[in-house]
Amino acid sequence: MACKVAIQGGFAEVEAGSWLMSRGQPAAFSGKAVRRRRTGWIVPDRARLELVETTGESKCASATRPFLTHIPCAAPVHAVSEKVLVAPAAARAGAKNVKVVPFSLSTALCATEFREEWLVAATVSRTARVNVEDGATLSVRPDAVVAWTGGLPTGFCPKLGLLDMLLPRGPRDLLLNFHGPAVVWIEGSSQRSCRNAAGKRRAC
């Protein structure tokens, strides 16, 4: 029997079951909500998603990411782990750190793969679903990526130096290229900020 979710009033409401939820969820629940330990030697999304077993209805919502998007997983879907609000635990097929800059961990994108059911993403702004035709390429800023189907994206930067791979800020003009056929869900991007030598934030 398929797990059901309803999005009402800014909340994703799910019935009793076993769920992957972002940390701090559910916001409210009836019955019990028990957090279970996620097993495995290498679980890249462990710090971002928790396994929660519930005996009643749960309501999930994020105060900092108020926009919710229901994403069906008829085909395998990779979702940015920190933007997943709730999904059936059984739908998860794995997770990986996508290194968009070679040898750089600071710019790696943690993505969770779902191969069935659905997921609900929570984002800072509204999302758009973009179809990428076979042979076409869609370039997206890393902070705007929510989820995608198809192959893994490749990183592109007009000019990449050694410091770009080593510094925590990563390359300033980094883009992710998604090659079709694919479907990409995106949200609005934000102005990037860095710290200068005095520790003050500035646009970069």
Image: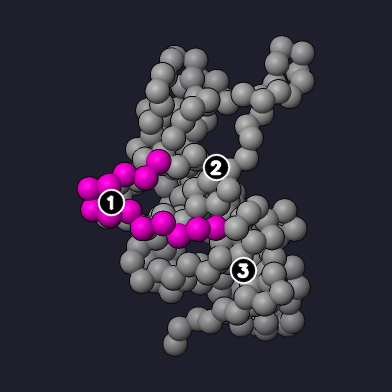
Element class at badge 3:
strand
Residue 180's disc number? 1
- Quadrant assignment for the C terminus: top right
**In the image, is residue 166 part of the stretch drawn in magenta?**
no
Which residue of the protein is positioned furthest toward the left in this rendering?
135
> Magenta residues, as a range?
127-139
Does any portion of residue 51 appear in the rendered image? Answer: no
Viewed as shown, does residue 181 lie left or right of 153? left
Element class at badge 1:
loop
Q: Quadrant of residue 91?
A: bottom left
Q: What type is the residue that disc 1 sits on? A: Gly
N-terminal label among 1 and 2:
2
Query: Residue 52's x, y, as percent?
Result: 61, 68
Residue 156's disc number? none
Which residue in the structure is indicated by mark 2?
Answer: 143
Does any portion of residue 66 appear in the rendered image? Answer: yes
Is 186 placed above or below 109 here? below
Element class at badge 2:
helix
Tally of marks: 3
Residue 52's disc number? 3
